[in-house]
């Protein structure tokens, strides 16, 4: 691991769609954000809709008629890959906080190792949104000959102080929950309250103030009890509460802590002494950088920095600014804008 420690055995969960060509040159790797698993698209084995169902598929932007698409679950995640919730084979107990410090570079390295196991040496493209965009940058820096093209979406070369502060508060929510027990909670009784509050804070930052205003305004919950003075009264309160509870029931708290901190730690300047030197290691033939004007968690100037630095280094770069009102989450919901941009880029030879 980049900051020390060893994982003696590693599992990486993945799903694939589309056929690998005889030349093995049409593979597209998708690296995910913090919370999704590898199920980006439905399949015969799992017909439930994936988290990028409208982006990946036959004839879609990431076209499974042309590409062999591989989506891997991040190292450190609870969705099948080795992480803090996994069993340490040396002790027979869960890693919990004995899991080594996790970095974005570790996530990229694990994904690269998984592809090697699948017999894929070079990618047609590596694609990643949010944390996955950081992982895609790390992948292109660490393995500069391993991907022809690079697509980074709503991401950054390093976290802003604002994003670090938000994630610090989210971690405090989890660690302050008595049920966290210093990370030693039983799997069936984790710090659900702390994780729920952390997710609520995250949800607020994932969307823009404009969308909150246009979508909910000051709408009241029908039948809300006036006797509950501080209970949910507005529709927006009910929305974030519902989604936070759903997340808290399906995600491991320690995994959340590790993945959150990995985003804080990432800084391409560590690969050469400056952002320019770090991004200068990228050898992708083409790069697409996509940002959203209403994203204040990964603001548009961070996307522009990536594009500007790569262009100054002589790389072929396309920078696209999208006016989506859904903020950071736009890449999950505004398919009318995102699909044409990504599809056009990948269709170009």
Image (spheres, grey):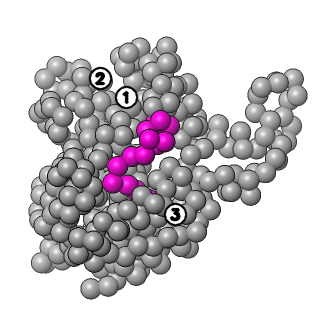
Q: Residues within 10 Å of mark 1 (few under 14, many from 20)?
A: many
Earlier along the polypeptide chain: callout 2 or callout 1? 2
The answer to the question of whether label 1 and label 3 lie on touching residues, with beta carbons closer than 8 A, is no
**Residue corresponding to mark 3:** 292
Viewer-proximal residue, 43 or 2? 2
**Viewer-nearest of discs 1 and 3:** 3
Q: Is residue 175 visible in this depiction of the protein?
A: yes
Q: Residue lying farthest bottom?
A: 349
Residue pictured at 41% horizontal, 14% vertical: 181
Position of the N terminus, as image quadrant, is top left
Which span of residues is magenta-colored?
Answer: 150-167
Q: Is residue 343 above or below residue 51?
A: below
Q: Is residue 70 above or below residue 343?
A: above
Q: Secondary structure at mark 2?
A: helix
The answer to the question of whether label 2 and label 1 lie on touching residues, with beta carbons closer than 8 A, is yes
Earlier along the polypeptide chain: callout 2 or callout 3? 2
**Residue corresponding to mark 2:** 97
x then y, percent, for residue 321: 49, 70
Residue pictured at 44% horizontal, 41% vertical: 161
Q: Is residue 78 visible in this depiction of the protein?
A: no
Residue pictured at 29% horizontal, 23% vertical: 97
**Residue corresponding to mark 1:** 254
Q: Residues within 10 Å of mark 2 (few under 14, many from 20)?
A: some
x then y, percent, for residue 99: 24, 28
């Amino acid at each position: 691991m980049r900051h020390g420690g060893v994982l003696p055995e590693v599992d990486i969960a993945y799903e694939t769609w589309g056929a690998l060509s005889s030349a093995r040159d049409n593979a597209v790797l998708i690296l995910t954000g913090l919370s999704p698993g590898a199920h980006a698209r439905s399949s015969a084995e799992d017909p439930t809709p994936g988290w990028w169902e409208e982006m990946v598929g036959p004839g879609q932007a990431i076209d499974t008629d042309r590409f062999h698409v591989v989506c891997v679950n991040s190292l450190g995640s609870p969705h099948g890959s080795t992480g803090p919730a996994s069993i340490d084979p040396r002790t027979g107990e869960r890693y919990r906080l004995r899991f080594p410090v996790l970095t974005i570079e570790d996530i990229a390295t694990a994904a690269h190792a998984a592809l090697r196991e699948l017999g894929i040496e070079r990618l047609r493209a590596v694609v990643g949104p949010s944390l996955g965009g950081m992982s895609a940058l790390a992948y292109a820096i660490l393995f500069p000959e391993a991907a022809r093209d690079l697509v980074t979406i709503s991401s950054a070369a390093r976290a802003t102080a604002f994003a670090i502060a938000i994630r610090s508060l989210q971690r405090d929510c989890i660690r302050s929950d008595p049920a966290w027990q210093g990370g030693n909670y039983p799997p069936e009784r984790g710090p659900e309250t702390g994780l729920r509050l952390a997710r609520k804070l995250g949800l607020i930052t994932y969307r823009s103030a404009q969308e909150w205003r246009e979508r909910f305004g000051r709408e009241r919950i029908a039948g809300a009890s006036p006797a509950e003075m501080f209970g949910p009264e507005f529709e927006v309160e009910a929305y974030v509460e519902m989604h936070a509870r759903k997340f808290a029931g399906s995600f491991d708290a320690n995994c959340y802590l590790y993945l959150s901190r990995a985003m804080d730690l990432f800084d391409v300047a560590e690969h050469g002494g400056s952002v320019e030197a770090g991004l200068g290691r990228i050898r992708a033939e083409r790069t697409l950088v996509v940002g959203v004007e209403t994203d204040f968690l990964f603001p548009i100037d961070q996307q522009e920095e990536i594009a500007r630095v790569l262009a100054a280094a002589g790389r072929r770069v396309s920078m696209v600014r999208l006016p989506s009102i859904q903020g950071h989450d736009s890449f999950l919901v505004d398919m009318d804008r995102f699909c044409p941009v990504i599809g056009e880029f990948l269709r170009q030879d």
